[in-house]
Image (cartoon, helix red, strand yellow):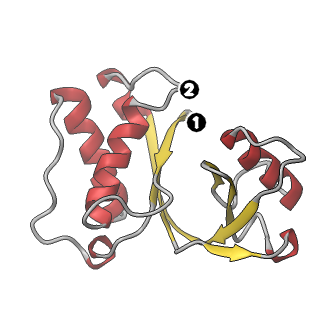
C-alpha cells in the first residue's frame, strides 16, 4: 500500500503535469500531514534520479501543502532535469522525506551519513544533503557534497547542522 504522503505527491504531480493545476489541500489531512516541517520530494525513473526539490524549513501552512508544492517543483523546476512529461508519469517512483528540526553540531563527529542529513551554512549560502543516500558512506563525502551544492569552498568555515528524516516510499 502506498503511504498517503507519497500518494499526495503523486496526485499533485499528475494534476499539475496533465492539467497545469495546483492541487488543493486535502479536506481532512491525515495525522502526518497536519504538522509543519521541511519536506523533500524525490522522483526516480528506472532507478535514476529524475527530480528532487525540498525545503529546509516549513514554508507552507502544513506538511500536506509542503508536499504538494515541493512535488510540483521536483517534477517541473529541478534545474538538473527537463520538466516531467505526461508520458513519463507511469515510469516514476516517489519518495517523501519529512525533516526533523535541524540542530547545530559542534563537529563532524556528531554526524552519521546513514542516520542524519546535513546542512552546511556559510553566510547566506546553505547546502543540504539527505541521509542514507546510495554511495554516500562517509561524513567527509556527505559534507563535501553539501558544500558543493551551496558553492562553499573546501577550506571555508561552515556551520553544520544535522537532522533526521522520516522517509516514505
Image-based side of 78 in relation to 148, left or right = left
Visible in this render: residue 167? yes
| Residue drawn where x is 63% and y is 57% of the image | 130
Q: Residues within 10 Å of mark 2 (few under 14, many from 20)?
A: few
Pointer 2 with pointer 1, Cβ within 8 A: yes
Element type at mark 1:
strand
Residue nearer the viewer, 167 or 159: 159
Element type at mark 2:
loop
Mark carried by residue 80 = 2
Mark 2 or mark 1, earlier in chain: 1
Q: Residue furthest front?
A: 123
Q: Which residue is mark 1?
A: 49
* Residue 13: image location, x then y, percent: 29, 39
* Residue 4: image location, x then y, percent: 31, 64
Q: Nearer the viewer, mark 2 or mark 1?
A: 2
* Residue 111: image location, x then y, percent: 79, 71
Image-based side of 107 in relation to 45, left or right = right
Residue nearer the viewer, 101 or 88: 101
Amino acid at each position: 500500500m502506498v503511504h498517503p504522503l507519497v500518494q499526495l505527491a503523486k496526485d499533485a504531480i499528475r494534476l499539475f503535469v496533465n492539467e497545469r493545476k495546483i492541487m488543493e489541500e486535502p479536506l481532512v489531512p491525515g495525522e502526518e500531514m497536519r504538522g509543519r516541517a521541511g519536506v523533500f520530494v524525490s522522483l526516480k525513473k528506472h532507478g535514476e534520479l529524475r527530480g528532487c526539490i525540498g525545503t529546509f524549513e516549513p514554508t507552507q501552512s502544513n506538511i500536506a501543502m509542503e508536499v504538494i508544492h515541493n512535488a510540483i517543483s521536483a517534477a517541473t523546476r529541478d534545474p538538473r532535469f527537463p520538466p516531467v512529461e505526461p508520458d513519463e508519469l507511469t515510469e516514476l517512483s516517489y519518495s517523501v522525506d519529512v525533516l526533523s528540526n535541524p540542530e547545530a553540531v559542534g563537529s563532524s563527529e556528531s554526524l552519521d551519513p546513514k542516520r542524519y542529513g546535513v546542512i552546511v551554512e556559510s553566510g547566506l549560502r546553505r547546502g543540504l544533503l539527505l541521509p542514507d543516500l546510495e554511495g554516500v558512506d562517509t561524513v567527509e563525502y556527505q559534507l563535501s557534497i553539501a558544500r558543493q551544492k551551496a558553492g562553499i569552498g573546501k577550506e571555508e568555515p561552515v556551520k553544520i547542522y544535522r537532522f533526521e528524516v522520516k522517509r516514505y516510499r
